[in-house]
Amino acid sequence: MRRQWSRPWRAKSPDEASLGNSGSPQSSLQRSSDAQSGPVLVVHGGAWAIPDNLVEAHLRGVRNALAAGWNTLQRGGSALDAVEAAIVILEDDDVFDAGRGSFLTSDGRVQCDALLMDGATLRAGGVGCVEHIRNPIRAARKVLDESPHVYFVGDGAERFAEQHGITLIENSELVVAREIEHLQEAQRRAKAGEQHDVFAGAEFAGQDLGSHDTVGAVALDGRGNIAAGTSTGGTLNKTPGRVGDASLIGCGTYADNEKAAVSTTGWGEPFMKLVLGKWAVDRVAAGAAPEESAWEAMRYLKSRLNGHGGMILLDATGRIGLAHNTPRMAVGYRRGKEEFVTVKLES
Ligand code: ASP
């Protein structure tokens, strides 16, 4: 059993430390004693073999998202507001696989999924396969706030968003040159028979292409409520219409004040088959610390389905769990004056 007061994700080497650990060494994520003392925000920008030359951009994106979400919490915003604000920043940052800069479908389009969930009420709002929305998380918020339904897909989702004040844009506005190249390379590899390995996620096959840059956030606000959100362009070269774990309740996103809030990233199909977000949240409800539960979920993902990815967890007392079984994960949190951002956690 992990020690209650340890920081589990000290950077592993001086090299890794220079890649972002900005937390104070004395701090701890498991201090239930200060749990009631104020808001907490945790953000991720994907878990994969983030190459050295992209580390700085990932750290910057996570810091910017933390700043936006934290600002919202400081102004008295709800956990839901903070999660949305943080995710909008990451969707607008084309480094990440969400909003502009997302991976492309096999026919060269951006197709996004997003979900927001409110732990106080269990209200949730999601959109799947949307192609003309700059910030899918904003559309998810509209569904949560202004619809009796929970999830909209495709045309219906876009129509709903437009009717609720969201401007639709051309799909080409979401496409970046880098992703056109990635798609061409993925399709060349698929033709050469490498597709199977990449989609199975086996041993990080095709590391440069097999990235998981989905974004997500979980927050605890000053009123003691938690929320979770995740936004993604899905996986590279996916078949149009495919929906991953990120926006499915209990798979990639979940929040319940009585349990915990979670957002995941990684190859979505194994997460979906295990309903892994809810699996981890339920373990917290059963008494496990979020930190233990997150790492246990990663071990379960690997041992059961050879899946890989990462997870952020937060309970309503402010305890945080961060874990990944990929070489790196872009992740950070803010609590009081304490900020921690890194691309590598210790298991
Ligand atoms: N989980 C996402 C999906 O499968 C991908 C990711 O995390 O990058 O759609």
Image (cartoon, rainbow, N blue to C red):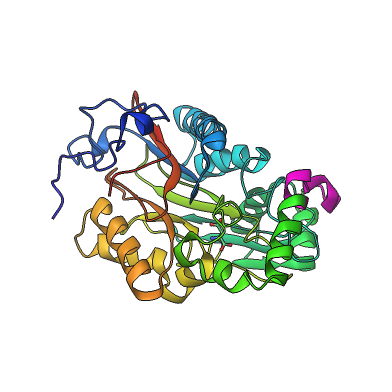
Give the x, y percent position of residue 115: 57, 58
Task: Report the label total.
Answer: 0
The residue shown at (84%, 50%) is 172
Q: Quadrant of the N terminus?
A: bottom left
Q: Quadrant of residue 284?
A: bottom left
x, y (%) of residue 345?
Answer: 34, 43
Tell me which residue sits at (58%, 60%) in the image.
125
For the magenta stretch, what is the residue range?
167-180
Q: Is residue 239 left or right of residue 67?
A: right
Q: Can residue 32 be seen by looking at this rendering?
A: yes
Q: Is residue 119 visible?
A: no
Above or below residue 65? Residue 269 is: below
- Which quadrant of the frame does ligand 1 lie within? bottom right
Q: Where 284 falls versus 337 (above or below)?
A: below
Residue 21 in the image, given as x and y percentages of width and height: 36, 30
Q: Is residue 173 magenta?
A: yes
Between residues 120 and 341, which one lies in front from this camera angle?
341
Q: Can you say whether 164 is above or below 93 in the image?
A: below
Q: Is residue 319 left or right of residue 159?
A: left
Residue name at image x 14 percent, y 45 percent: 4
Vertical placement of 265 versus 153: above or below? above
Q: Is residue 253 magenta?
A: no
Q: Is residue 223 left or right of residue 242?
A: left
Q: Position of residue 100 (x, y in %)?
A: 72, 45
